[in-house]
Amino acid sequence: MRNPAYLVHEDTTRVDLLLKLILASILALTLVLGVWLLFEDIVAALVMFAVTLFDALLFRAIMPRRYQIYSDRVRIVLGGPFALNIPFYDIREARPASGGKAFAYWGVRFATSTKGVVEIIRKKAFNVVISPSDRDTFLERLSQAIDRARSLD
Protein backbone atom coordinates (compact mmCIF):
# COMPACT_ATOMS: atom_id res chain seq x y z
CA MET A 1 0.00 0.00 0.00
CA ARG A 2 1.31 3.44 -0.91
CA ASN A 3 1.89 6.11 1.67
CA PRO A 4 -0.64 8.95 1.72
CA ALA A 5 0.36 12.09 -0.12
CA TYR A 6 2.01 14.79 1.96
CA LEU A 7 2.72 18.44 1.29
CA VAL A 8 6.30 19.05 0.12
CA HIS A 9 6.19 22.74 -0.81
CA GLU A 10 3.68 25.56 -1.06
CA ASP A 11 4.04 28.87 -2.86
CA THR A 12 1.79 31.85 -3.37
CA THR A 13 0.90 33.37 -6.71
CA ARG A 14 2.57 36.39 -8.18
CA VAL A 15 0.00 38.83 -9.58
CA ASP A 16 0.94 41.69 -11.89
CA LEU A 17 -0.42 45.15 -11.21
CA LEU A 18 -1.75 45.30 -14.78
CA LEU A 19 -3.92 42.21 -14.23
CA LYS A 20 -5.27 43.67 -10.98
CA LEU A 21 -6.13 46.89 -12.80
CA ILE A 22 -7.87 45.06 -15.63
CA LEU A 23 -10.01 42.99 -13.26
CA ALA A 24 -10.84 46.01 -11.10
CA SER A 25 -11.74 48.02 -14.21
CA ILE A 26 -14.19 45.36 -15.34
CA LEU A 27 -15.90 45.37 -11.96
CA ALA A 28 -15.88 49.16 -11.75
CA LEU A 29 -17.35 49.52 -15.23
CA THR A 30 -20.33 47.28 -14.53
CA LEU A 31 -20.85 48.86 -11.12
CA VAL A 32 -20.79 52.41 -12.51
CA LEU A 33 -23.16 51.39 -15.29
CA GLY A 34 -25.48 49.96 -12.65
CA VAL A 35 -25.46 53.20 -10.67
CA TRP A 36 -26.05 55.26 -13.82
CA LEU A 37 -28.93 53.00 -14.85
CA LEU A 38 -30.62 53.51 -11.48
CA PHE A 39 -31.84 56.83 -12.85
CA GLU A 40 -32.96 55.37 -16.18
CA ASP A 41 -34.21 51.81 -15.72
CA ILE A 42 -34.28 50.02 -12.37
CA VAL A 43 -34.42 46.55 -13.95
CA ALA A 44 -31.36 47.24 -16.09
CA ALA A 45 -29.57 48.60 -13.02
CA LEU A 46 -30.33 45.43 -11.08
CA VAL A 47 -29.04 43.35 -13.98
CA MET A 48 -25.78 45.33 -14.00
CA PHE A 49 -25.39 44.87 -10.23
CA ALA A 50 -25.97 41.14 -10.70
CA VAL A 51 -23.34 41.09 -13.46
CA THR A 52 -20.89 42.86 -11.16
CA LEU A 53 -21.51 40.32 -8.40
CA PHE A 54 -21.26 37.40 -10.82
CA ASP A 55 -17.98 38.70 -12.27
CA ALA A 56 -16.52 39.21 -8.80
CA LEU A 57 -17.46 35.67 -7.77
CA LEU A 58 -16.13 34.28 -11.05
CA PHE A 59 -12.79 36.06 -10.67
CA ARG A 60 -12.59 34.82 -7.09
CA ALA A 61 -13.31 31.24 -8.14
CA ILE A 62 -10.85 30.95 -11.04
CA MET A 63 -7.88 33.01 -9.86
CA PRO A 64 -5.13 30.79 -8.42
CA ARG A 65 -4.38 31.35 -4.74
CA ARG A 66 -1.52 28.92 -4.11
CA TYR A 67 0.56 26.30 -5.83
CA GLN A 68 1.22 23.19 -3.78
CA ILE A 69 3.61 20.35 -4.43
CA TYR A 70 2.57 17.10 -2.81
CA SER A 71 4.53 13.87 -2.82
CA ASP A 72 2.49 12.64 -5.80
CA ARG A 73 1.06 15.70 -7.57
CA VAL A 74 1.03 19.45 -8.15
CA ARG A 75 -2.11 21.15 -6.89
CA ILE A 76 -3.25 24.55 -8.14
CA VAL A 77 -5.51 25.97 -5.44
CA LEU A 78 -8.20 28.22 -6.87
CA GLY A 79 -10.84 30.22 -5.02
CA GLY A 80 -13.31 28.45 -2.78
CA PRO A 81 -13.39 24.66 -3.01
CA PHE A 82 -11.88 24.54 -6.50
CA ALA A 83 -8.46 23.12 -7.33
CA LEU A 84 -6.65 21.46 -10.20
CA ASN A 85 -4.50 18.40 -9.51
CA ILE A 86 -1.73 17.37 -11.90
CA PRO A 87 -0.35 13.93 -10.99
CA PHE A 88 3.38 13.42 -11.44
CA TYR A 89 2.86 10.50 -13.84
CA ASP A 90 1.23 13.00 -16.24
CA ILE A 91 4.10 15.52 -16.09
CA ARG A 92 6.65 15.17 -18.85
CA GLU A 93 8.62 18.30 -17.90
CA ALA A 94 8.41 21.47 -15.83
CA ARG A 95 10.52 24.39 -16.99
CA PRO A 96 10.86 28.16 -16.87
CA ALA A 97 8.86 29.91 -19.57
CA SER A 98 8.85 33.33 -21.15
CA GLY A 99 6.58 35.99 -19.73
CA GLY A 100 4.53 36.12 -22.91
CA LYS A 101 3.17 32.64 -22.20
CA ALA A 102 1.33 34.05 -19.21
CA PHE A 103 -1.26 35.65 -21.48
CA ALA A 104 -0.80 34.04 -24.92
CA TYR A 105 -0.50 30.29 -24.62
CA TRP A 106 -1.98 27.22 -26.22
CA GLY A 107 -2.96 25.38 -23.05
CA VAL A 108 -4.37 26.16 -19.64
CA ARG A 109 -3.26 29.52 -18.30
CA PHE A 110 -3.15 29.92 -14.54
CA ALA A 111 -0.29 32.42 -14.75
CA THR A 112 -1.17 35.76 -13.20
CA SER A 113 2.15 37.46 -13.89
CA THR A 114 4.64 37.76 -16.72
CA LYS A 115 7.51 37.26 -14.25
CA GLY A 116 8.52 33.84 -12.99
CA VAL A 117 6.33 31.81 -15.33
CA VAL A 118 6.56 28.01 -15.10
CA GLU A 119 5.38 25.77 -17.93
CA ILE A 120 4.24 22.27 -17.00
CA ILE A 121 4.37 20.00 -20.04
CA ARG A 122 1.89 17.16 -19.65
CA LYS A 123 1.73 13.77 -21.37
CA LYS A 124 -2.03 13.33 -21.69
CA ALA A 125 -3.74 16.68 -21.24
CA PHE A 126 -3.33 20.36 -21.97
CA ASN A 127 -0.09 21.93 -20.79
CA VAL A 128 -0.33 24.45 -17.96
CA VAL A 129 1.44 27.72 -17.19
CA ILE A 130 1.58 29.11 -13.66
CA SER A 131 3.40 31.95 -11.93
CA PRO A 132 4.64 31.06 -8.45
CA SER A 133 6.19 33.88 -6.46
CA ASP A 134 9.56 32.05 -6.26
CA ARG A 135 10.00 30.20 -9.56
CA ASP A 136 13.46 28.79 -8.90
CA THR A 137 12.61 27.26 -5.53
CA PHE A 138 9.30 25.95 -6.91
CA LEU A 139 11.01 24.23 -9.85
CA GLU A 140 13.74 22.80 -7.62
CA ARG A 141 11.25 21.34 -5.13
CA LEU A 142 9.04 20.04 -7.93
CA SER A 143 11.98 18.31 -9.60
CA GLN A 144 13.01 16.73 -6.30
CA ALA A 145 9.48 15.52 -5.58
CA ILE A 146 9.06 14.03 -9.07
CA ASP A 147 12.42 12.26 -8.85
CA ARG A 148 11.53 10.88 -5.41
CA ALA A 149 8.11 9.69 -6.58
CA ARG A 150 9.49 8.02 -9.69
CA SER A 151 12.21 6.25 -7.71
CA LEU A 152 9.51 4.71 -5.48
CA ASP A 153 7.53 3.33 -8.43
Image: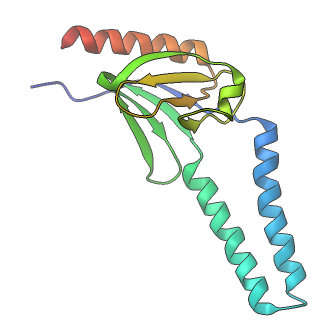
Q: Position of residue 118 (x, y in %)?
A: 57, 22
Q: Which quadrant of the view contains residue 113?
A: top right
Left/right of residue 122 with respect to residue 138 in the rendered view = left
Task: Point out residue 112 in the picture as x, y percentages from the top left corner.
Answer: 66, 36
* Total tally of numbered discs in the picture: 0
Residue 134 position in % (x across, y down): 62, 19
Colour scheme: rainbow
Residue 49, can we see it?
yes
Question: Foreground: 3 or 115?
Answer: 115
Identify the residue at image location x=90%, y=90%: 39
Q: Nearer the viewer, residue 14 or 113?
A: 113
The answer to whether residue 95 is left or right of residue 87 is: right
- Name the residue at the front extreme: 106
Q: Examine the rendered structure and indicate whether residue 64 appears above or below residue 56.
A: above
- Work out whether residue 99 or residue 38 is closer to the camera in this orientation and state it: 99
Farthest-out residue, left: 1
Residue 99 location (% of width, % of height): 71, 23
Front one among 31 and 120:
120
Task: Identify the image quadrant of residue 132.
Answer: top right
Where, quadrant-wise, is the C terminus in this rendering? Answer: top left
**Viewport quadrant of the N terminus:** top left
Residue at screen point 76% across, 35% down:
16
Instruction: Please tell me whether residue 104 is drawn above or below residue 119 in the rendered image.
Output: below
Q: Is residue 71 visible?
A: no
Question: Along the horizontal axis of the image, is 81 left or right of 28?
Answer: left
Vertical order, 7 against 145 (above or below): below
Q: Residue at x 59, y 12 (%)?
A: 136
